Image (tube, rainbow, N blue to C red):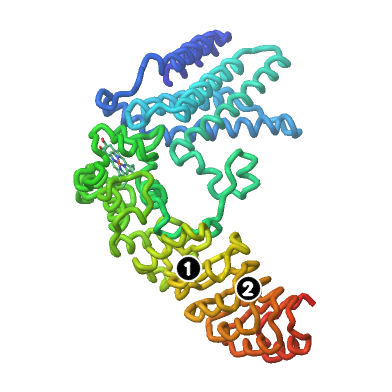
Amino acid sequence: MTNETNQETCCSKCRRPWCITIFGLLIISFLIAMPFIAGTPDAEKSSDTIRFLGRFHPVILHLPIGIFSLIIIQELMSMFSRYKPQPGLIAIFIGAASAVVAVLFGFMLYMGGGYEMSKLLGDHLWGGIIFACAAVLTLIVKAWPLPEKVSQKLYRAMIFGSVGIMTYASHGGASITHGEDYLVEYAPNPIRKVLGHEPKVDPADIPVKPLEEQIAYEDIVQPILNKRCVECHKEGKSKGKFRMDSYELLLKGGKEGDAVVPGDAVKSNIIYRCELPEDDDEHMPPESKTDIEDHELAVIKWWISAGADPAKTVAQLEITDEIRGAIAKLDRSIDPKAGKSEVPTQAKQDLPSAELLKSVAALSKEFPGGLTFESQASSKLTFTGVSLRSNLNDAVFAKLKSVIPSMVSMDLSSTAITDSSVKLLASAKDLRMIRLSETKISDAALDTLVGLKNLESINLYGTRVSDAGVEKLKSLPHLKHLYLWQTDVSAGMIEKLKAALPGVEIVTGI
Ligand code: HEC
């Protein structure tokens, strides 16, 4: 840099800015040749000085960004306002010089090891180099005493071009450090769409798969690795030449190999590294990061010991109550929104028994998608027979008998069930919601329902229930919604119910 300052004094002496031009072109040639001369980084060969300087890349890069932002603001002002500020040569000089230094340090960071060439990194590297070259060219253009008209147009094009490339290069750098989704992670869906990202789905809207149906690797293990490890072990940033962002790469391992030894958690390097004492240099994740939690590690160990299979579901692996507890705990820690979940803490600890899990797994084949746990860590079930419609008759419904006591919500609308199926519900003491609309049930069914004291919502739309039956529902203590549209219930009875149940919403369609 000192050289360049000398050159500038020299130039002002000779009045023709040849020195800046020649020196600038030399720098540009060097920057462009640099990646070709240096070859691929070798962490072992690179010196500590290179590593030391490389770490300053994230610090110094803000200088050219700040200076060029200021220059562009001045330029916009001189275009659109009466006030015409002119950025001096010195501002552009410092901007260009700091851009060159930032690129050199960035290249040293890359040469120091830990980053693997990828499209993202390549784009960032070349984006940075082209930006620094454009910045130096802008300085050269500004230094020459060209005719006013030519000089202004050329300079303006250069400055806007440079800032455009700078924006692109900085975004690439941020994506490498924080992940490509960083900027739009919390963006509203319309903005995500414009920027070409998938719309975001609220975790609360994703139906929770019953634990037994979850794929151990994909649904349980990989999310833990994503949270604790992948930021340093992924494309473009594979520390120890080890990537953990896919099953194949995880099993392939890094320099030390044997990252995962199927069936043997103790011999697996990822477990070994995590179990080292925290002050050990080799402990993973490194000291600067939040440590992996015991229950998370227990789940990974369980999966490796069970054979580290990529596709097996929990039901296909042997599982103890302890691991089941550890998995239930994950729900909260993995999903950042889980803290806001409406599932009360008590329900979280309310784990399904092995027997119930087995029945549910077996019944899932009979009623695909019909039977789900209320939440990942709940032993309560919801059922919908809507997709089966008239195929769901009393005989089919009877197969659910063993799981009925666990039901909290049932949708039997438009199915072929009758009063005799409803009789089976007598054991569903926790049932809160039931839809029986457009079924063949009659008043007799309501005799069963009055026994289910937790019912909050009953839908009887389009059934042949009548005054005598619904009057009994008055005794349900938690009832909030009652749908009686298109039934045989008389207007007089509706009035009576409304008077007797002031807090209940009675929907009659009138
Ligand atoms: C903050 C960055 C960072 C995080 C987070 C991180 N690691 Fe590492 N990891 C490194 C670095 C740096 C190395 C290379 C130095 C070394 O071998 O200790 C490494 C190396 C490794 C290696 C050795 C690879 C080989 O074969 O050479 C394993 C195994 C490993 N990490 C596992 C993990 C696991 C498991 C996690 C998550 C629980 C994790 N790491 C999280 C930075 C990280």
In terms of image quadrants, where is residue 140?
top right
In terms of image quadrants, where is residue 416?
bottom right
Q: Nearer the viewer, residue 87 or 379?
A: 379
Give how far across and how far down residue 313 sits, in percent: 38, 52
Give how far across and how far down residue 317 sits, in percent: 31, 54
Badge 2 crowding class, 10 Å Cα cut-off, few under 14, some 14 to 19, many 20 or more, is: many
**Is residue 471 depicted above or below 75 in this figure?**
below
Give how far across and how far down residue 365 sits, in percent: 47, 57
Residue that badge 2 annotates = 436
Residue 97 seen in the figure: no
Q: Secondary structure at mark 1?
A: helix
Q: Is residue 204 left or right of residue 413?
A: left
Q: Is residue 437 left or right of residue 403?
A: right
Q: Secondary structure at mark 2?
A: loop
Residue 219 seen in the figure: yes
On whether ligand 1 comes within 8 Å of the CB at mark 2, the answer is no
Residue that badge 1 annotates = 399
Q: Nearer the viewer, residue 444 or 61?
A: 444
**Mark 1 residue type:** Lys
Rendered-image quadrant of the N terminus: top left
Q: How many marks?
A: 2
Ligand 1 falls in quadrant: top left
| Residue drawn at point x = 21 percent, y = 46 percent | 264
Which residue is farthest front? 395
Dot placed on the residue nearer the N-terminal end, 1 or 2: 1
**Mark 2 residue type:** Leu
Q: Nearer the viewer, residue 348 or 321?
A: 321
**Is residue 501 depicted above or below 178 in this figure?**
below
| Residue drawn at point x = 52 percent, y = 30 percent | 169
In terms of image quadrants, where is residue 402?
bottom left
